[in-house]
């Protein structure tokens, strides 16, 4: 008969070979896996086990393949299957069965004439014994035989046919398979399914021996308990095998020499075993000699296993197939007959968890750095407001940044006319940086220069590892020497003008993530605004100023600006916000067309509003957006003094603070208006309005009614917020009409403001 129960995974595997027309035909692993509808690697492990048991033979074909076939001494008999399924014959049962057979033979020879003595011997046997004649009727049955089949008395068998002990299906098997063997070979031994008196069935071990008269001696044993033990053993073995093969962690079996003899599918997945390979090249190699383990520096750890000591391990490694993993697990020694028989190693790949922990730690560091950075930026913002000079502002910024826990070095430099960076201030490790250290060599593509990119884009640029960036070899040497890794290059900008570069260096990995870049990048605007404010204040307070007369003959670009009789004069350019300005001036009536043409030709010249129109001249207001001359002068602390548009050309006079880099201003203006000419550059002493000038104005230039109106409005609460008294109420106090009050007030205010703005 065939291999055995369907739930036996090894019997199922053997059945694939037995069911072939030619049972000696070899099969490949994929062919067996396809027949079983199972995973190839799982089937491969079963086939190896069947080879170890002697049921199959195998050989390698090609580089990574094998074929398998039934062993020459393997036969699909019930007896063979029974022994293999039970894990080998039971010595006690074999001895008892042999004793029964020997007794039967002696009975037929020596005791043939002594039926009483023979009956006593049969009765004392632990196996059921029955004797049937040539017609199949019972001549004898011992009490054990009756008990096996559920009868109380042996008399129930005498004269009855042996078919009473089996069901219909089993009787067919006896007639077709078993009885012919008994007749041809004189006997048969195997397993059958008996039927008790109550109709229930049970597994039995049966031995049939033919007698000279055509009958048979039947020796039967109920093997229900043994079958149950075998079933439990098979289920336990199957459960253990399935548990190992489907375990969520890697399992390795090591022999007594610590050689790897087995890897479960999860272990093969962890080491990255290629799909086309049936087994790992690590099989047969001592684990403590495996190169990836040796490279971890923990190979000696496994040498403690033969000493009976369990070990635990935790290390990253790269397998022989290039798969990176982080192993953690435990190995326990195994003993057989008190001798070391290897070890079981259980390993888990915690690479994802380790990565998650590293990411979480980086997030904690980034949040802590971001929290500290917010405090630092707030402190810098508050501190720079109180500084009176640009140098003081730069010192505060660098010292606050370098003094924080997050950063190692901070520096500020300026870009000169030759596009070189000249460091001005530095704080933290490493002292002052020089130009060669910060900038890459001249052969470097400008697009790879973070400083060039920061100036061009006016946005923060980040180098995560300056030590590994080839264009910055010298900066990398500096970073290694003073213990920092990453750097941020922040342009110091206000209203489109780059005042310099702020550099910040840190030793934290993955510094300047998006949130951190956003916060620290604000410093460029904060510092730029503070420097611009100091420059404007210096320009306003200084007695010395630089007067600069400029002429732009081709303001209209490729299309000439139309000419008109007379001159368009500009009285004031007032900055608003976000690069917006209002230009106030006067023009002949017919020159309005020139302003409208500029609006159409130049994107920075906007809408024109006219007012105070007379027969010959008008006053106008024109909105400017990011007008280069106005924005550049304003961001460098300068003031517009006067200007004009005549014959398509623009002439302006501006006042700049002492020490201003005039050459840089001119070059910047020429980027938009290439034809710009410098007509005059002169440092002059400015006449600043004094208190005496204002008192003289109140005493001499204002009429008595104008002065009285201004004083009544000021001291009467008209200028307070909220306004305490209306113009009508104050006019009533002065005993004048409200319209007269507002007329006197406007004239008085105008005369006062003319004195204030005369030199600004």
Image (cartoon, helix red, strand yellow):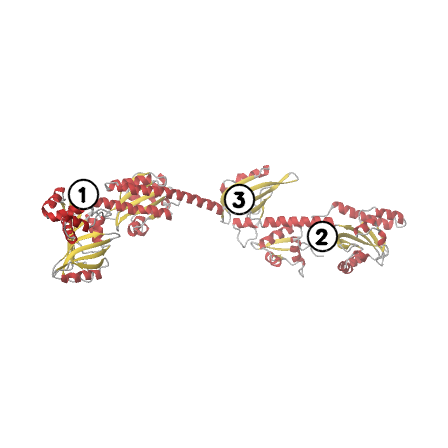
Secondary structure, mark 1, is: helix
Q: Nearer the viewer, residue 273 or 678?
A: 678
Cα distance between the residues tagged 2 and 3: 41 Å
**Mark 3 lies on residue:** 290
Which of marks 3 and 2 precedes in the sequence?
2
Q: Residue at the far right: name it.
A: 113
Q: Nearer the viewer, residue 391 or 115?
A: 391
Which of marks 2 and 1 precedes in the sequence?
2
In the rendered image of this protein, does residue 198 appear above or below residue 251?
below
**Mark 2 lies on residue:** 80
Specify few, some or many for label 2: CA neighbours under 10 Å numbering under 14, 14-19, or 20 or more: some
In the rendered image of this protein, does residue 540 appear above or below residue 171?
above
| Contact, mark 1 vs mark 2 (Cβ under 8 Å) | no
- Pinpoint residue 364: horizontal percent, then vertical percent: 42, 43
Cα distance between the residues tagged 3 and 1: 79 Å
- Pinpoint residue 68: horizontal percent, then vertical percent: 63, 55
Q: Answer yes or no: is residue 302 visible.
A: no
Q: Nearer the viewer, residue 227 or 218?
A: 227
Location of residue 139 by image quarter: bottom right
């Amino acid at each position: 008969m065939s291999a055995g129960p369907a739930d036996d995974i090894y019997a199922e595997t053997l059945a694939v070979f037995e069911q072939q027309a030619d049972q000696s035909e070899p099969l490949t692993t994929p062919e067996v896996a396809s027949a079983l509808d199972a995973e190839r690697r799982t089937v491969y492990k079963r086939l190896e086990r069947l080879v170890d048991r002697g049921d199959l033979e195998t050989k390698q074909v090609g580089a990574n393949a094998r074929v398998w076939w039934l062993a020459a001494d393997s036969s699909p008999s019930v007896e063979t299957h029974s022994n293999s399924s039970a894990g080998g014959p039971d010595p006690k049962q074999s001895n008892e069965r042999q004793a029964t057979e020997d007794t039967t033979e002696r009975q037929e020879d020596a005791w043939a004439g002594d039926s009483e003595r023979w009956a006593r011997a049969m009765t004392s046997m632990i196996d059921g014994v029955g004797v049937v004649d040539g017609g199949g009727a019972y001549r004898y049955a011992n009490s054990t035989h009756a008990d096996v089949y559920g009868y109380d008395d042996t008399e129930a068998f005498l004269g009855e046919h042996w078919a009473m002990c089996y069901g219909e299906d089993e009787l067919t098997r006896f007639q077709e398979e078993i009885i012919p063997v008994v007749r041809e070979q004189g006997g048969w031994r195997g397993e059958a399914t008996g039927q008790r008196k109550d109709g229930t069935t049970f597994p039995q071990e049966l031995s049939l021996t033919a007698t000279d008269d055509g009958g048979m001696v039947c020796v039967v044993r109920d093997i229900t308990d043994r079958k149950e033990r075998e079933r439990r053993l098979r289920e336990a073995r199957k459960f253990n095998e399935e548990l190992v093969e489907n375990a969520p962690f890697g399992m390795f079996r090591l022999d007594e020499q610590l050689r790897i003899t087995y890897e479960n599918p999860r272990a093969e997945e962890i080491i990255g075993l290629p799909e086309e390979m049936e087994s790992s090249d690590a099989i047969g190699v001592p684990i403590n000699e495996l190169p990836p383990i040796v490279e971890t520096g923990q190979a000696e750890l496994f040498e403690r296993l033969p000493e009976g000591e369990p070990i635990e391990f935790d290390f990253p490694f790269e397998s022989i197939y290039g798969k990176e993993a982080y192993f953690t697990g435990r190995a326990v020694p195994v003993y057989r007959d008190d001798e070391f028989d290897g070890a079981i190693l259980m390993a888990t790949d915690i690479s994802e968890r380790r990565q998650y922990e590293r990411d979480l730690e980086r997030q904690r560091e980034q949040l802590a750095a971001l929290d500290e950075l917010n405090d630092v930026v707030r402190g810098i913002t508050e501190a720079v407001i109180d500084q009176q000079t640009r140098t003081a502002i730069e010192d505060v910024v660098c010292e606050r940044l370098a003094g924080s826990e997050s950063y190692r070095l901070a520096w500020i430099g300026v870009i000169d006319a030759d596009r070189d960076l000249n460091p001005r201030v530095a704080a933290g490790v490493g002292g002052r940086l020089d130009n060669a250290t910060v900038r890459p060599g001249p052969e470097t593509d400008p697009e790879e220069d973070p400083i060039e990119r920061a100036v061009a884009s006016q946005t923060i640029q980040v180098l995560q590892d300056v030590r590994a960036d080839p264009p910055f070899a010298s900066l990398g040497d500096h970073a290694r020497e003073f213990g920092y890794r990453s750097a941020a290059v922040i342009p110091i900008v206000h209203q489109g003008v780059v005042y310099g570069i702020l550099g910040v260096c840190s030793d934290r990995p993955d510094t300047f993530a998006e949130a951190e870049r956003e916060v620290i990048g604000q410093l460029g605007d904060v510092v730029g605004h503070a420097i611009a404010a100091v420059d404007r204040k210096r320009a306003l307070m200084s007695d010395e100023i630089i007067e600069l007369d400029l002429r732009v003959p081709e303001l209209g670009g490729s299309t000439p600006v139309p000419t008109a009789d007379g001159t368009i004069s500009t009285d004031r350019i007032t900055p608003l916000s976000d690069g917006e300005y209002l230009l106030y001036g006067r023009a002949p009536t017919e020159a309005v067309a020139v302003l409208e043409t500029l609006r159409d030709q130049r994107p920075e010249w906007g809408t024109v509003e006219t007012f105070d129109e007379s027969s010959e001249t008008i006053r106008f207001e024109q909105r400017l957006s990011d007008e280069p001359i106005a924005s550049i002068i304003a961001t460098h602390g300068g003031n517009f003094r006067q200007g004009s548009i005549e014959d398509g050309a623009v002439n302006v006079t501006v006042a700049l603070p002492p020490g201003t880099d005039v050459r840089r201003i001119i070059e910047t203006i020429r980027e938009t208006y290439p034809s710009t000419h410098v007509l005059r550059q002169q440092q002059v002493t400015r006449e600043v309005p004094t208190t005496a000038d204002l008192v003289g104005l109140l005493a001499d230039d204002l009429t008595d009614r104008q002065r009285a109106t201004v004083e009544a409005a000021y001291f009467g609460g008209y200028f307070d917020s909220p306004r305490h008294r209306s113009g009508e109420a104050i006019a009533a106090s002065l005993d004048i009409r409200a319209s007269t009050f507002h007329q006197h007030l406007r004239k008085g205010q105008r005369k006062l403001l003319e004195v204030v703005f005369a030199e600004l």
